[in-house]
Amino acid sequence: MTTENDTDLEAQIAEWRTYMLRRRAIHGSDVDELEDHLRERVGDLTETGLRPDEAFLIAVKRMGRMDELSREFAREHSDRLWKQLVLTPDAPAEAERRRDLLAMVVCAALAALAVKLPTLFGLDLDQDQAFYARNAGLFALAPLTAYFAWRRRVGTGTGVVLALLFVLGAVGANAYRLDDDSQSIVLSALHLPLALWLVVGLAYAAGDWRSGSKRMDFIRFTGEWFIYFVLIALGGGVLTGVTVGTFSAIGIDAEVFISEWLLPCGAAAAVIVAAWLVEAKQGVIENMAPVLTRVFTPLFAVTLVAVLIAIAVTTNAIDVERDMLILFDLLLVVVLGLVLYSISARDPGKPAGIFDWMQLALVVSALLIDVLVLIAITGRITEWGFTPNKSAALGENLILFVNLAWTAWLYFSVIKGRKRFALLERWQTDYVPVYAAWAWTVVLVFPPLFAFA
């Protein structure tokens, strides 16, 4: 079977070369260089479990972002793409898809089961909200990591590392004796999912976290996963409404079933289902995150500029209470996400345009707001001293400041033609471990550092 697949792949590449060489504007040496890139991408995709012919078609489509001829080739062969990947799969591919579906169902069931397992030990979802808040990331992300570990066929060493990191997360979430009103509970509930999400990234990359391209692939996956998860959540909201209405019509109160079973178990399972959907799509059709980035970048840029103008006109300081700090940090994270997904989809060889200037304006506006937040936090710390919330906010905003400041400089340099776009992309992927290190620090170090306050 391998020999047959290799033969088919070579035939497809030969057809692609013939198509490219028909154009007078492109030379044989150019096609040779493009073929090297194409084969490299095909190799990366086959390592994820795709068959060579599937990997070829997806690789050609992705190359279409950098090369107009490849885009035309992918467009002309789109009927074959859908037939091979969706409509008429052959027997080996169908068997593989069924195994993948079964693995997803098992992992989703494990996630739902993990949510209800603590009830066997006397923990109630309503009465022990602090426990569930601290452990929510463990319940959903451990099965997701197992799914990717199986799908990527990670080695024993990587599997052990993944398991130890989740054990570490479980210790950080449960070993410290914290009061229900402790600030550390909120910080752990916010930061542990982030720390564990990057552990998921380690499984997604099959342990090769040093690869910048694989980190960028995980960033792309994260954007697509979030969109699918939101869509599933919206569908779940409709299902919940229908369930309530249907049972009410026959005189049955479904509130307990919905609050204790449908919502928590469904949310945990949806984490796995959304990942499976992204993997099944596997870049065959256009990713949605970059498309939404095009829509929301100008809107967020205008909003941030309006906020800066309002602050300048009213001379009002930024409120640094916990809820406001979370809101501003979320705003800055959204801005960073818009920048990331714009970078992930941008043609590196394309000259700078108006959208790049818009991105630069967005980054600079976010940077100025981050400076104002840092000034406000520093003022409160100077006046009232360090607390877990303010210390965590200070660290996060300093990390965001460094990222945004260097991103703004690199973007400006790229627009002016002084630096290559690849440097901007590499900066973002290389900075990801900084977020992971900070998240683990907040979860593991902050509680004893602040006397479990």
Image (cartoon, rainbow, N blue to C red):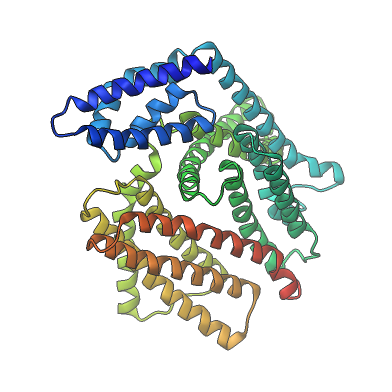
**Residue 103 vs residue 417, the one in the foreground:** 417
Task: Say if 210 sits above or below 180 in the image.
Answer: above
In which quarter of the view is residue 94 placed?
top right
Which residue is found at the position 53% from the left and 33% from the top? Answer: 48
In which quarter of the view is residue 408 placed?
bottom left
The answer to whether one can see residue 371 in this image is yes
Q: Is residue 131 left or right of residue 431?
A: right
Outermost front residue:
29
**Residue 250 vs residue 280, the one in the foreground:** 280
Outermost left residue:
24
Q: Position of residue 12 (x, y in %)?
A: 35, 20
Outermost right residue:
121
Which residue is found at the position 43% from the left and 16% from the top? Answer: 7
The answer to whether one can see residue 64 in this image is no
Q: Position of residue 38 (x, y in %)?
A: 36, 33
In which quarter of the view is residue 129 placed?
bottom right
Q: Position of residue 118 (x, y in %)?
A: 80, 44
Q: Position of residue 146 (x, y in %)?
A: 67, 38
Task: Say if 173 sits above or below 384 in the image.
Answer: above
Q: Is residue 79 left or right of residue 154?
A: left
**Residue 367 vs residue 77, the one in the foreground:** 77
Task: Say if 448 sits above or below 4 in the image.
Answer: below
- Looking at the rendered image, the quarter that the C terminus falls into is bottom right
**Residue 289 vs residue 376, the one in the foreground:** 289
Count the numbered circles shown: 0
Q: Is residue 195 left or right of residue 83?
A: right
